[in-house]
Amino acid sequence: MTENKNKISLWNEALKDAETVEILQWAGKEFSSKVKFASSLGLEDQVITDMIVKSVPEIPVFTLDTGRLFQETYNLIQETEDKYNIKISVFFPDTNDVQTMVANHGVNLFYNSIELRKMCCHTRKVKPLNRAFSGLDSWVCGLRREQAVSRTDVDTVQWDAANKLVKVNPLYNWSEDDLWQYIKKHNVPYNKLHNQGFSSIGCASCTRAVKDGDDVRAGRWWWELPEQKECGLHVVDGKTVRKMSS
């Protein structure tokens, strides 16, 4: 009995991994060539990339370059491509859109109001994402319930009303400890800013390190209230299309 108790954590880790792979395989089979993985290169996304490469390589991986990322993030893109021998598609904002926005509101408009911050996110992230979604029926992302108060309703599979797509969240019930255990076990590359207190990493202008005990997304748009900290990429109507066993 003692031996079995000592194995429980290992079993839980293995079963959690297996469930996540099953979700990814289901997505690959269910949506075939009409599903992509949108990676923000966070811990969650690096875990999913590792699983996709090993178990569902037919699911393409892409990311967004807002034009204001940390150098460490660019380094991670290269490191990930080199380790897994893959090519991550990169989508950029429209140059004219950015020029017009900056001309009208300044280079640091996002600090001036929530409306302007969301305008910047829409220009640099949402619109490029819409282009990446062209022709798709579904997308995979790394949302977790534990990430923020705005994400407590995240489920395995949800209807993304904003993009009219099925959104698959294979890590919906993972903890941050689960992520680090997997990363260390499988030697998954990760953004080195995590070693400097950055828990959630986005644009350099809108991300800072957090203190121990802070919410995982406390360093994102730190001047705003927690319930306002979304960029427009993850708008759902709460409807669960299909809930897999947890």
Image (cartoon, rainbow, N blue to C red):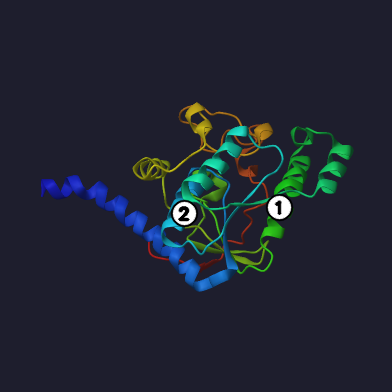
Residue displayed at 46% across by 41% down? 189
Q: Which mark is residue 179?
A: none
Q: Which mark is residue 126?
A: 1
Q: Which mark is residue 172?
A: 2
Is residue 168 depicted above or below 115 in this figure? below
Q: Could you say which is closer to the camera, residue 223 or residue 18?
A: 18
In the rendering, at what x and y percent does residue 197 appear? 50, 28
Residue displayed at 51% across by 27% down? 196
In the rendering, at what x and y percent does residue 198 appear? 53, 32
Q: Amino acid at mark 1?
A: Val
In the rendering, at what x and y percent does residue 106 appear? 84, 34
Determine whether label 1 and label 2 are within 8 Å by CB.
no
Residue displayed at 64% across by 37% down? 225
Q: Residues within 10 Å of mark 1 (few under 14, many from 20)?
A: many
**Which image quadrant for residue 167?**
bottom right
Q: Secondary structure at mark 1?
A: helix
Q: Secondary structure at mark 2?
A: loop
Q: Amino acid at mark 2?
A: Tyr
Residue displayed at 56% across by 60% down? 60
**Which image quadrant for residue 100?**
top right
Of callouts 1 and 2, which one flags the residue occurring earlier in the amino acid sequence? 1
Q: Quadrant of the C terminus?
A: bottom left
Q: Is residue 5 visible?
A: yes
Q: CA distance from mark 1 to mark 2?
A: 22 Å
Return the residue found at the far left.
1
